[in-house]
Amino acid sequence: MSTFFQPVPLAARSCLSEVLYWVAFQRLPIDDPPDPDDAGQIGVAGADLGEMYQYIWPDETERAGLPLDPRCSFLSAGNVYIPVKLYDEILSQDHIAPALRKQRSFERDAIRNLEREYSQWRPLYERVVEYPRSKIFVALTEGRLAAFGRRLPAEIRVPSSQVSASRRDALREISFSEIPPSFWSLKGIDFESNCASNSQETYWDIYLITEEVLKVFPGSRERAEGIARIGIGLVADDTAPRLSIRDGRRGRPSFPWDGFHLEVTDLIVRNEMPDKKEAAIAYFQNWFEERHRFRPSRAAVGEKLKPYFDKFVKEKGQKR
């Protein structure tokens, strides 16, 4: 069967992890039209939650000579990563029925297994991205790439889950400014959290202009036989070298949803999650609108909230 390819719009802006994935794995930063699964905004993923959700696709690990990313099969199967500490807090409660306690223990063990496998895989990944990171760093320090970010107050080094919600809102009010080439320190760049710091300053919510990134790093090209133009797209016949298809996944990391997962976890840990699912949906629709100027559909938010309510809210006797 023939494979068809359509043009896709590139993102006007790319965050640090998108630039890294392009240079290291040739993953294009794709711009998606607004839809329930992607707010299409530059943002920061919260703490280790963001890191766990930014997995590397199978064709990318294969091309890089890496074993399969353990996060890939876990998250692409629709599982939700929830920190072990939250499971521990739930299991410490006396009212949980034995069958439910057994199920939660099983889920906690699965998370622990994921974290163990990831801790073994991560050093291999670090080896692969070490050189691409250094190439990006050199381009930034030489001024060949311009970057922009929110310069944080001196008392805040890197935003984290420990920063209060009101404080995070205030940080998002800081205007973007161009980051001078002299600022950069390779050890101070956190690609996953989209932050960078040196001994005196910290920038957050960093982005680069995608067009400039592709000029500086045009990518390696391979010619493929059996490719023909049809309309504005391309078609590859059965005999052509197989080109990877990523099960419809888009190239742009879904940063606002990462922040959503962190916010949900924070609310559950603090026992501040609304009792009713409809109220929680309304809360997070407003949360997205205030922080990302985007209001996802009720169905999209409800789908993301469902595993949390099924596992942690319903078992407390709260109504969905």
Image (tube, rainbow, N blue to C red):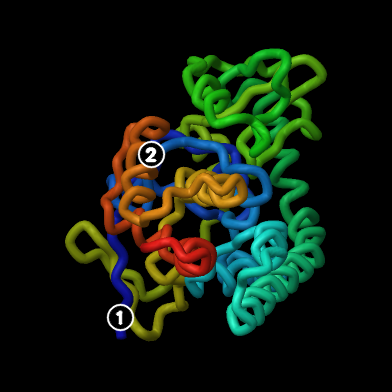
Q: Looking at the image, which residue is at 56% across and 48% down?
A: 271
Residue 154 occupies which quadrant of the picture?
A: top right
Query: Image height check: is 187 above or below 62?
Result: above
Q: Looking at the image, which residue is at 41% across and 71% down?
A: 247
Depth-wise, is mark 1 or mark 2 nearer the camera? 2
Residue 181 occupies which quadrant of the picture?
A: top right
Q: Amino acid at mark 1?
A: Ser
| Mark 1 residue element | loop
Dot placed on the residue nearer the N-terminal end, 1 or 2: 1
Q: Looking at the image, which residue is at 77% across and 31% down?
A: 188
What residue would you read off at disc 1? Answer: 2
**Residue 71 versus residue 4: which sits nearer the camera?**
71
The N terminus - image quarter: bottom left
| Mark 2 residue element | helix
Residue 223 in sight from this viewpoint:
no
Residue 163 occupies which quadrant of the picture?
A: top right
Task: Give coordinates of residue 204: x percent, y percent.
Answer: 60, 27
Question: Callout 2: 10 Å neighbours few (<14), some, many (20+)?
Answer: some
Q: Amino acid at mark 2?
A: Phe
Task: Give coordinates of residue 195: x percent, y percent.
Answer: 65, 32
The C terminus - image quarter: bottom left
Give the CA separation, mark 1 to mark 2: 40 Å
Query: Image height check: is 285 above or below 8?
Result: above
Query: Image height check: is 219 above or below 145?
Result: below
Task: Give coordinates of residue 177: x percent, y percent.
Answer: 53, 15
What residue would you read off at disc 2? Answer: 288
Left or right, 199 with reference to 251: right
Residue 141 in sight from this viewpoint:
yes
